[in-house]
Amino acid sequence: MLHSSTILLLLTGLALSVVSQEDTDTNNCPQNGVPGIPGVPGLHGHKGDQGVAGPTGLAGTTGLAGPTGPPGSPGPPGPPGPSQSKPGTTYVRWGKSSCRSISGTQLVYDGIAASSHREHVGSGANHLCLVKNPQYAAYTPGKQGYAQLTPMEYQDGTAVNNHNAPCAVCETARNKVLMIPGTTTCPSGWTREYYGYIMTQRKDIHKKSEFICVDGQPDSLPGSAAHTLIAGELFRVEAVCDIIPCPPYNDYKEITCAVCTK
């Protein structure tokens, strides 16, 4: 029969042998196992909260011009242009210093009716409406024997006989002007500016003169009552029945006239 102390020693040795064998087995095995296959993706997480706005960026460069757009609709009519762009014309009212007060007609200037020296066979044949205050440019002092201008005197037996005739240059907005001899009225659609008598130089003077329409109620220039022998003269005109048909003309009646515009 074994002693108790002997049995204790045997058990202790057996325990140490077992522990030593376990350590040996552990050192002989690999440290990590074989990797497994990847797992399936996980589910999406919840949407996060909106972040704060970032700072404003720098301005970009100007882009290229776009294509031309379609034409716009017409605008409203513009205001009328200046009056000088409107059509119109002028005429001389012989025997008056003013224009008639009718729509569209106004005075440009008033002046002195003049023509060439009555005794000169040369010079001009037409009549002029001289301004009352002349302006001179370059000139030669003294008389040069040039053509001469004189006033025009009425020789009609009326209250203005021997008086000098005035004249007025009138502007009208109408662009046509016509002097019609032999009548005191204007055709339909025309405006009568004035009417009067056809007048010109006396028939026995050795110079020609144009026919003009002198107002039927003529005025005279102040201080011009004295007769001047060299002045141009204004006589009324009569028809010659041997050539012009009478009737309707009559060689004992003075020829009238009308100045008309349209």
Image (cartoon, rainbow, N blue to C red):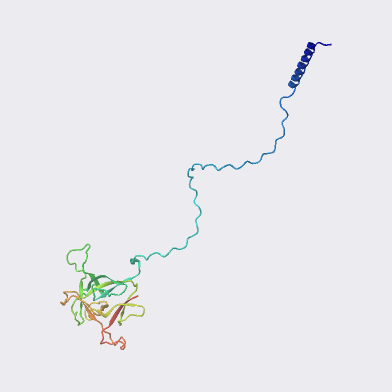
Task: Place residue 120 in its image quadrant.
Answer: bottom left
- Quarter that holds the C terminus: bottom left
Percent of width and height locating residue 254: 26, 84
Kindly identify the residue that appears in the image at 28 percent across and 82 percent down.
Answer: 256
Residue extending furthest toward the bottom? 247
- Which of 150 and 109 lies nearest the eye of the viewer? 109
- Which of 160 and 162 lies nearest the eye of the viewer? 160
Percent of width and height locating residue 130: 23, 70
Percent of width and height locating residue 169: 27, 72
* In the depicted structure, whether residue 17 falls above or below residue 49: above
- Which of 245 and 155 lies nearest the eye of the viewer? 155
Kindly identify the residue that appears in the image at 35 percent across and 66 percent down.
Answer: 85
* In the depicted structure, whether residue 1 falls above or below residue 103: above
Q: Is residue 191 visible?
A: yes
Residue extending furthest toward the right? 1
Q: Is residue 58 left or right of residue 258?
A: right
Task: Place residue 236 in its image quadrant.
Answer: bottom left
- Quarter that holds the N terminus: top right
* In the depicted structure, whether residue 18 falls above or below residue 129: above
Task: Place residue 96 in its image quadrant.
Answer: bottom left
Q: Is residue 261 left or right of residue 167?
A: right
Q: Is residue 117 visible?
A: no
Percent of width and height locating residue 177: 33, 75
